[in-house]
Amino acid sequence: MNTSKWWVTAVFIFLILVTACTNGNPGNTSVSTSGTAAALTQANTATDTPTPTPTNTPSPTPTFTPTPSPTPTFTPTPRATPLTVVGDPRAAQLAEPIAQDGAMCGLVDVLDFPLNPPDAIDVPGGRDFGVFRSRYDKYHAGEDWWLARGRTNFGEPVYSIGHGRVTYAEPLGWGRDQGVVIVRHTLSDGSTFLSFYGHLDPPSITLRAGDCVTRGQQVGEIGQPRTAPHLHFEIRTHMPIEPGPGYWWEDPTKAGWLPPSQTIWTQRVMASPGVLWTHEPPAESVSITYLGTVFGDVALTLEGTQLVATDVNDGATLSLFTELPEVASAAIDTASGIVYVADRLGHVDAWQLSDPRLGEDTAVSPLTSLWHIELDTVGTPVLLPLPGGGTVLLARGEVYALAGNGRLLWQQEIGGRSFAWTASDDLLLLSTTGSSHAVWSTNGAEPFTQLASMSGYPLPVGEQIWLYAENGVYRLAPDGQSLELIYALSTGFLDRGTIMALPDGGVLLAHADIFDQRLIAFHEDGSVRWERSYAGLLLERQRLLR
């Protein structure tokens, strides 16, 4: 999971858990490791001791004006008496290690961070995995952690991230760069990985190979290497009995290393009560874009340049569509089952998708080619579903609307680049940034109409259109001629927030700014139902603000 958006996922999971606790129904603790664990299992096909061989190939109309609004003012103090939230999601995950076959030191329950556990509050660092360092002419295979800038970190305690067995513990394992401890951790599916703690003070290493350690147990203290005192922290699947180089010739994920912080957060989400299954792309550098659900329970995603069909009931991969051309963007018409794909040269293809489960035991592909066209455009495209069927392609501020049969319906210049969009059966809403900050609307048959001269996350809810912008929550006025500010926010980070519709016509907003992280629920009429601060989420403090 991108670490910059982890808290959005966390607060929604937490909200579900709080609801369960309030209703008196304990969460169903079903821990799945089909995501990270699967990746770890695949990586573990390598033997323990050999070191990978480097390749020596490094890689690095009308515009409606919003009604005047007051200047947003951040108020850090609660506006209501703080309430106690019942239930502890973390407590539902914790378990004492129990020796068993294949895991004599017990299985991982949940992972913590190596400094100031469990959540590394106020600990900088952990952002430089895979960074190229010209000093070494290689890529960083771990993360550098420290407790504070401007003062020495020498002697600060370092802790095991989870239950496991020590495979290596040497006070001078890195010579002049001092001590190293390596711990093997076993997940519930039997897959394993290693946590690595480097630059430790030699006298602080008292563990020995074969010792069992528990989550949060001290493994040493930060020492004094040739550089300033800090912890070099790795998560990897190879080299259990040797320190390793600390840097690699190319992308470390290609040679058995995993992004440490991202791996910890992913495992935490997977271990959360109520999570049935998880799915991750085959490579850390590949992003997943959800396209839609068809045939009732088949989810279609774009993973890098590959389309993947997944059974939402159990997370099983049904099809990997490898016969498609180089895909830069994709969209699906869930009503007709037509899949649209585009590349960076203006080529658009349409494919008819049939239920992939019907051809599980045959050689018949669930994709049938319908048509291919070439548009006069280049650049990274964005494909969106068009109301009534068809697709919209955006590239370099130009819009092309295509019918389901490939006919060009209309073409339009809107400027800017796509930021966010949402669609219903009869409406497509799009916001743009760059040279044009605006919100646009189309019914499919006609070109886009500009609704507002600002960007954000548009959301249709019933007959209303909401907009979550950097400085507040807006709603399209009943006369359709302006936006009404219904709630001012301190200027925040849109890429770290989101907005979603509630069944009763209201909305739920996750907002982050430099001071706070908040979850806000609105009634259908725009009034605030409740507001919760999550600035203290990791500190296990929650406040109801309204």
Image (tube, helix red, strand yellow):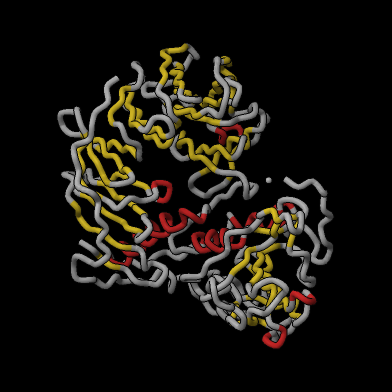
Residue 194 image position (x, y, % from top left): 68, 68
Asked which quadrant contains residue 189, the reply is bottom right
Q: Can residue 318 be seen here?
A: yes
Asked which quadrant contains residue 419, the reply is top left
**Along the viewing direction, whichever of 490 and 424 lies nearer the viewer:** 490
Q: Quadrant of the C terminus?
A: bottom left
Q: Is residue 527 above or below residue 66?
A: below
Q: Can residue 31 be seen here?
A: no
Residue 2 image position (x, y, % from top left): 52, 52
Residue at 51 percent of width and 70 percent of height: 123
Residue 330 image position (x, y, % from top left): 53, 30
Residue 218 image position (x, y, % from top left): 60, 82
Q: Is residue 419 above or below residue 30?
A: above
* View extreme (front): residue: 150
Residue at 32 percent of width and 43 percent of height: 469
**Along the viewing direction, whichever of 157 and 426 lies nearer the viewer:** 157
Is residue 180 found left or right of 317 in the rendered image? right
Residue at 82 percent of width and 49 percent of height: 56
Is residue 393 found left or right of 477 in the rendered image? right
Asked which quadrant contains residue 334, the reply is top left
Residue at 45 percent of width and 27 percent of height: 333
